[in-house]
Image (tube, helix red, strand yellow):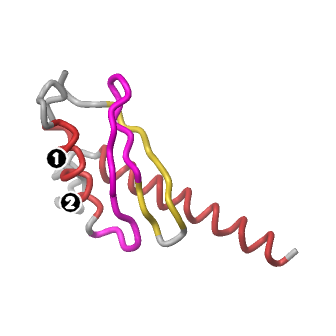
């Protein structure tokens, strides 16, 4: 029973990390008045650019630097969305973010 509860808490914490990562990538860098470095430059991404995936990954990696234990390790496109592969201290996961300018 303790192992199940422990695993459940790990899953909850992992979901929280994923949500925090999503927020950091989606939030326009400089938009939050109490923390001007919170967020990313993902909003500047031109989805039509041939290097959009590489830039999206760099923007995500920079946004996640302050978030201990979470790193963007990959990205792929699915239509208008960018799917980021994340590595956390609790395992891997993915988040989907709608692309910026098309």
Residue drawn at x 48%, y 72% is 89
Residue drawn at x 58%, y 65% is 13
Mark 2 lies on a secondary structure that is helix
The stretch drawn in magenta includes residue 51: no
Residue neighbourhood size for the residue with mark 1, other residues' Cα within 10 Å, grouped as few (<14), some (14–19), many (≥20): many
Secondary structure mostly seen in the magenta stretch: strand
**Is 68 on the left-hand or right-hand side of 16?**
left
Task: From the image, tell me which residue sits under label 2.
Answer: 62
Looking at the image, residue 63 lies above or below residue 95: below
Distance (Cα) linking label 1 and label 2: 9 Å
**Horizontal and vertical percent for residue 92?**
50, 59
Q: Which mark is residue 41?
A: 1
Toward the viewer: 3 or 76? 76
Residue drawn at x 22%, y 30% is 100
Q: Quadrant of residue 71?
A: bottom left
Q: Tell me the quarter of the image containing the N terminus.
A: bottom right
**Horizontal and vertical percent for residue 80?**
32, 24
**Is 95 on the left-hand or right-hand side of 29?**
right
Which of the two labelled residues, at mark 1 and mark 2, occupies the earlier sequence position?
Answer: 1
Magenta stretch in the rendered image? 66-85
Q: Quadrant of residue 90?
A: bottom right
**Is 27 on the left-hand or right-hand side of 84?**
left
Mark 1 lies on a secondary structure that is loop
């Amino acid at each position: 029973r303790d192992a199940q509860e422990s695993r459940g808490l790990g899953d909850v914490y992992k979901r929280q990390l994923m949500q925090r990562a999503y927020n950091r990538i989606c939030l326009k860098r400089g938009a939050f008045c109490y923390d001007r470095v919170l967020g990313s430059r993902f909003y500047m991404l031109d989805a039509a650019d041939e290097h959009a995936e590489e830039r999206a990954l760099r923007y995500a990696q920079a946004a996640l630097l302050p978030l201990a234990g979470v790193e963007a390790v990959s990205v792929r496109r699915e239509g208008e969305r960018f799917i980021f592969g994340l590595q956390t201290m609790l395992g891997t996961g993915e988040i989907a973010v709608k692309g910026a300018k098309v």
